[in-house]
Image (cartoon, rainbow, N blue to C red):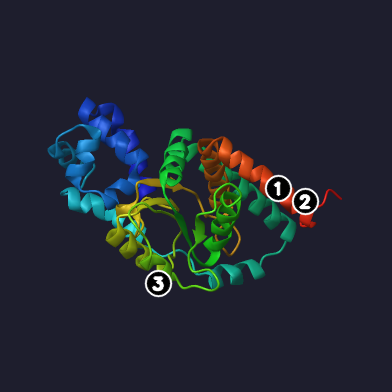
Amino acid sequence: MRPPALSERIIEKLPDMTRQLASSARFLVDHPDSVVISSMREIAGRVGVAPATLLRLARLLGFQDWSDFREVYVEHFRSSPPHYGDKADALSKRRGAPELVQEVAHAQLAALQHSATTNSAEDVDSAARILSRAERIFVAAFMSCRAPGLAFTYICRLFRSNVTLLGSDGTSLVADLADLQPNDAVLAINFVPYSRDIHLVADAISRSRAALVSIADSRATPLSGHAQSILLFAPQSPSFFPSITGAVALAETLAAAMLAHAGKTAATRVRSIEKALYSSGSYSDG
């Protein structure tokens, strides 16, 4: 059984549950990743019930104990997504590219909607506040996530100078991470399959006690245990390669919220840099 099917079973049984069981069940349906990254006691604390209530819920749903129930979610998280090569091969055999173009466009719109509805305005604002308070911001975005990471870095440097894309030309990721301090913050952007560099970031966060904001495809990533804030995006796409549309949207929204917190001095810096770009010929009206 996979988590979506289990959620359907939970919803079917909701009318017959006691108030405490129903509260626990609704939480698990709305926060399936918590089953993977949190203990039964931690989840019970968040719901406001005794751990025994979650055990009764698991047995009501046909599982022997909480471990058997949790394994459904763990196994789903472990399962690998289709290889890019396999999806590319399937796409190359399709007929009707216009239909595929429409499917990709619809998937991108769905990804934007997912980012907007899954992450509340308060979630984004909280993440923006964490980053805004940091003395320096380091952006951990590797491989295909480099694009949203680069966009965030470029936008933020228009109103604050101390934003660095980790592992940029002329430096190394290890050297950058070694410089991480408790007053710094890291914005990490990632999805399955994760770059091996994410583990270096996790180790550096643990060592330095720097703040961490994560933009990810799941609450259950190698960085989840270190993050003060997690914003979610959906990378699913009918194309052979996952979509980063949602991640780009979140990066841009996060940068906008940070500018709002930065105040008049930041706005003055933006105006000054914009003027310099036009004066230098880098920008043109036509």
Contact between marks 2 and 1 (CB within 8 A): the answer is: yes
Give x and y (percent) for residue 209. 30, 55
Residue at figure coordinates x 48%, y 34% from the top left: 121
Earlier along the polypeptide chain: callout 3 or callout 1?
A: 3
Residue at figure coordinates x 44%, y 46% from the top left: 131
Asked whether the viewer can see residue 18, the reply is no
Q: Residues within 10 Å of mark 1 (few under 14, many from 20)?
A: some
Contact between marks 3 and 1 (CB within 8 A): the answer is: no
User: Label 2 vs label 1: CA separation?
Assistant: 6 Å
**Is 104 placed left or right of 172 in the picture?**
right
Give x and y (percent) for residue 280. 77, 57
Q: Is residue 194 above or below residue 228?
A: below
**Is 141 placed left or right of 105 in the picture?**
left
Residue at figure coordinates x 52%, y 44% from the top left: 254
User: Label 2 vs label 3: CA separation?
Assistant: 37 Å
Earlier along the polypeptide chain: callout 2 or callout 3?
A: 3
Asked whether the viewer can see residue 227, the reply is yes
In the image, which is nearer the foreground, mark 2 or mark 3? 2
- In the rendered structure, which amino acid carries the disc numbered 3? Val
Find numbered disc 2 in the image and state the secondary structure of the residue it sits on: helix
User: Label 3 vs label 1: CA separation?
Assistant: 33 Å
Q: What residue is pinned by disc 2?
A: 278
Observer-nearest of 65 and 37: 37
Q: Which mark is residue 274?
A: 1
The image quadrant of residue 79 is: bottom left
The image quadrant of residue 204 is: bottom left
Give x and y (percent) for residue 117. 50, 37
Q: Residues within 10 Å of mark 3 (few under 14, many from 20)?
A: some
**Is 166 placed left or right of 88 in the picture?**
left
Contact between marks 2 and 3 (CB within 8 A): the answer is: no
Q: What residue is pinned by disc 3?
A: 174
